[in-house]
Image: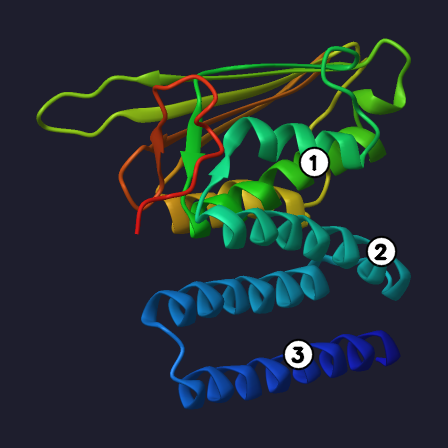
Amino acid sequence: MAQDHVRDARVDALEADNARLRRLLDASGASDGLRHGLRDTLAMLRAVLRLSADTAESVEGYATHLEGRLDAIARARISLDMSGGISLHSLISDELMVHLIREGDQADLAGPAVRLRPKAGQVMALAVHELCSNAVEHGVFGLSEGKVNVVWSIDTGDTMRPDDLVLTWKETGGTDVALPTRRGFGMQVLNDMLRYELNARIDLAFEPDGLRCTMRLPLVPRIGRIVDEPGSDDASEPN
């Protein structure tokens, strides 16, 4: 009961702060784009708070994991505020570095230059954070031979359907990897939030040497775009 009370108090406090911020934005005459972006962020924060509370096994675990999740969203938000979009490569490599996983050491990344729009960027940042955290706590990053290979490509569509962004996160070096016995926060982000927010299709396979997660999502304008020019992956989005 005490644990539930602490969670409920934190959720209520944040929702009260969110309501005050929305009123300030409306009163300040902020642009529609700014208000829309901040409301998306606040909605995600509320969802993260509630889902973290629902899936936490202890108050301590709730606080620890919640901090990491909010930090992941904040890192994405900073990049989005600076340029209006976020590099998929940078999003993944930055999150890996937070967990002390260096690209070229325990991680290999490969794929075309893709920039994600704000909402998609924040959702993907949270999903990648959960994959990293799971690999550190339960998967291959806790093992000397553990590695992850992250590759993405564009599955070209036709006149009847858009192109798909297909991303595969594949861990290797693990042993006796098994399906989790409970459906925690990370599983709900991958199975529910990505599907609901980005219309993504997710395939999770707990293979003997590590988790394989394949995400397929339509690369429509509200989600992101391919950047053709080398070095322009971090350029600002057009107004």
Q: Is residue 6 above or below residue 161?
A: below
Disc nearer the start of the sequence (1/3): 3
Amino acid type, label 2: Thr
| Local secondary structure at mark 2 | helix
How many angstroms separate mark 3 from mark 2 (CA)? Answer: 17 Å
Q: Residue at x 43, y 34 (%)?
A: 115
Three-letter amino acid code of the residue under disc 3? Leu
The disc at residue 64 is 2
User: What is the x, y in percent for residue 227?
Assistant: 36, 25
Quadrant of the snapshot with the N terminus:
bottom right
Name the residue located 43 percent from the left edge and 90 percent from the top edge. Answer: 27
Whether residues under marks 1 and 2 lie with C-beta atoms below 8 angstroms apart, the answer is no
Q: Which mark is residue 95?
A: 1
- In this rendering, is residue 165 above or below 28? above
Going from N to C along the chain, the mark reached first, 1 or 2, is 2
User: Amino acid under label 1?
Assistant: Glu
Residue 188, percent from left and from top: 58, 48
Task: Give the image location of residue 144, x and y in percent.
Answer: 91, 12
Give the residue at mark 3: 14
Instruction: Tell me which residue sits at (87%, 80%) in the image.
Output: 2
User: Looking at the image, do the residues carrying marks 3 and 2 touch, with CB atoms under 8 Å apart?
Assistant: no
Q: Give coordinates of residue 140: x percent, y percent.
A: 80, 20
Observer-nearest residue: 238 or 88? 238
The crowd level at tag 1 (other Cα within 10 Å; few <14, some 14-19, many 20+) is many
